[in-house]
Image (tube, rainbow, N blue to C red):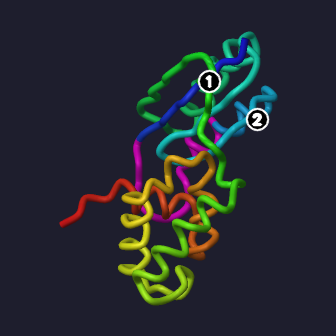
């Protein structure tokens, strides 16, 4: 049986490079042979039941040793009918083209407020329901995945 673990570590610092505790936790999951999707506000790791359960102590220890003050974990079986990945380019490309048309330019040519707006519009279109879409959107915007996560979780004021 496959298991799916999602873990977050805090504190969250905002923009810039990902926090050391998030990087170390992801690296621990990868060393354990798990398939990972890294995001500083949430990293997922998938693998065989025993491999995931055996890796959890080292993931948590790596986060804490890296400076985390809190680690949150969600664990479950790998969901059936997982959403398509961003590798299914026709779906994500359609979202990106629609947002570019609405904003009147390519995502990579936008200034920072424009990129923030683009991320909000992509979220409204459901682009982030696709697995691994954050990495693809980050590439289109010319920013890091960490920045996209920051835009997604930013308070609109």
* Picture quadrant where residue 61 is located: top right
Magenta span of residues:
11-25
Image vertical order of residue 54 relative to residue 58, above or below = above
Residue 121: which quarter of the image? bottom left
Q: Which residue is mark 1?
A: 80
User: Which residue is at 66% across, 62% downward?
Assistant: 90
Q: Nearer the viewer, residue 96 or 33?
A: 96
**Residue at horizontal 37 percent and vertical 64 percent from the top:** 120
| Residue 94 visible in this rendered orientation of the protein | yes
Between 63 and 29, the one lying in front of the other is: 29
Query: Label 2, label 1: how many angstroms apart (C-alpha)?
Result: 23 Å
Mark 2 closeness class: few <14, some 14–19, many ≥20 residues within 10 Å: some
Q: Position of residue 134 (x, y in %)?
A: 56, 56
Residue at left 54%, top 75%?
97
Q: Position of residue 4 (x, y in %)?
A: 62, 24
Q: Is residue 86 left or right of residue 125?
A: right
| Percent of width and height locating residue 71 | 46, 29
Residue 141 to residue 144: above or below: below
Residue 88 in picture, x, y percent from top left: 69, 54
Q: Which residue is labeled 2 in the image?
A: 30
Please name the predominant secondary structure of the magenta segment in the image. loop
Mark 2 vs mark 1: in front: 1
* Helix, strand or loop at mark 1: loop
Query: Does dot 2 land on a helix, a strand or a loop?
Result: helix
Q: Is residue 85 magenta?
A: no
Which image quarter holds the N terminus? top right
* Image side of residue 121 versus residue 75, left or right: left
Numbered-mark total: 2
Q: Nearer the viewer, residue 103 or 58?
A: 103
Q: Earlier in the sequence, mark 2 or mark 1?
A: 2
């Amino acid at each position: 049986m496959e298991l799916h673990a999602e873990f977050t570590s805090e504190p969250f610092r905002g923009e810039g490079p990902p926090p050391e505790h998030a990087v170390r936790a992801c690296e621990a999951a990868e060393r354990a042979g798990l398939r990972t999707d890294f995001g500083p506000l949430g990293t997922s790791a998938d693998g065989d039941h025993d491999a995931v359960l055996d890796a959890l102590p080292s993931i948590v220890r790596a986060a804490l040793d890296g400076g985390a003050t809190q680690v949150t974990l969600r664990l479950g079986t790998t969901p059936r009918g997982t959403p398509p990945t961003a590798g299914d380019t026709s779906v994500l490309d359609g979202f990106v083209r629609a947002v570019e048309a609405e904003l009147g330019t390519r995502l990579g040519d936008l200034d920072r407020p424009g990129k923030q707006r683009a991320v909000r519009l992509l979220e409204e279109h459901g682009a982030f329901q696709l697995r691994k879409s954050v990495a693809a959107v980050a590439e289109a915007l010319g920013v890091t995945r960490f920045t996209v996560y920051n835009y997604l979780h930013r308070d609109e004021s």
